[in-house]
Amino acid sequence: MSHLPTLTPADFGTGTCGREPAGGGTPCGAPATWHVGWLRNEEGGLRNSLACDAHMAEARDQFVYRGRHRVSADCGMPGTVWMTGRCGVLKAE
């Protein structure tokens, strides 16, 4: 008997780059490779987005962001929080 729950893994690696052209238009749509944390929102969490390699290079050169890390399965899991250099789940009390 397994003591592990039956879960369907979330494949966050299939997320797409959300960069939109200046003035609006269709988002990039390339596979996302970076998870970018911007400024804090009203609830105290980070506003975040996904970027492909090309648009991460653009963001690095043109914008100020709080942090970034490679997209991983942890990024899209329920209950994750932005940690230094990655997303993760806080230890239960």
Image: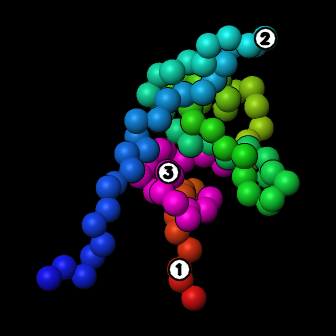
* Residue 22, image x, y percentages: 75, 13
Which residue sits at x=48%, y=57%?
77
Q: Residue furthest left?
A: 1
The magenta region covers 67-84
**Is residue 72 positioned above or below 60 on the image?**
below
Is tag 2's residue or tag 3's residue first in the polypeptide sequence? Answer: 2
User: Which quarter of the rendering shows the C terminus?
Assistant: bottom right
* Residue 83, image x, y percentages: 61, 62
Which residue sits at x=78%, y=11%?
23
Q: Which residue is mark 2?
A: 23
Q: Is residue 80 magenta?
A: yes
Q: Amino acid at mark 1?
A: Lys
Helix, strand or loop at label 2? It is loop
Q: Which residue is mark 1?
A: 91
Asked whether residue 17 appears in the rendered view, the answer is: yes
Which residue sits at x=19%, y=79%?
2
Q: Amino acid at mark 2?
A: Gly
For disc 3, the neighbor class at 10 Å (few under 14, some 14 to 19, many from 20) is: some
Of 72 and 80, the residue lying toward us: 80
**Is residue 74 positioned above or below 79 on the image?**
above
> Distance between the Cα atoms at labels 2 and 3?
29 Å
Helix, strand or loop at label 3? It is helix
Is tag 1's residue or tag 2's residue first in the polypeptide sequence? Answer: 2
Is tag 3's residue or tag 1's residue first in the polypeptide sequence? Answer: 3
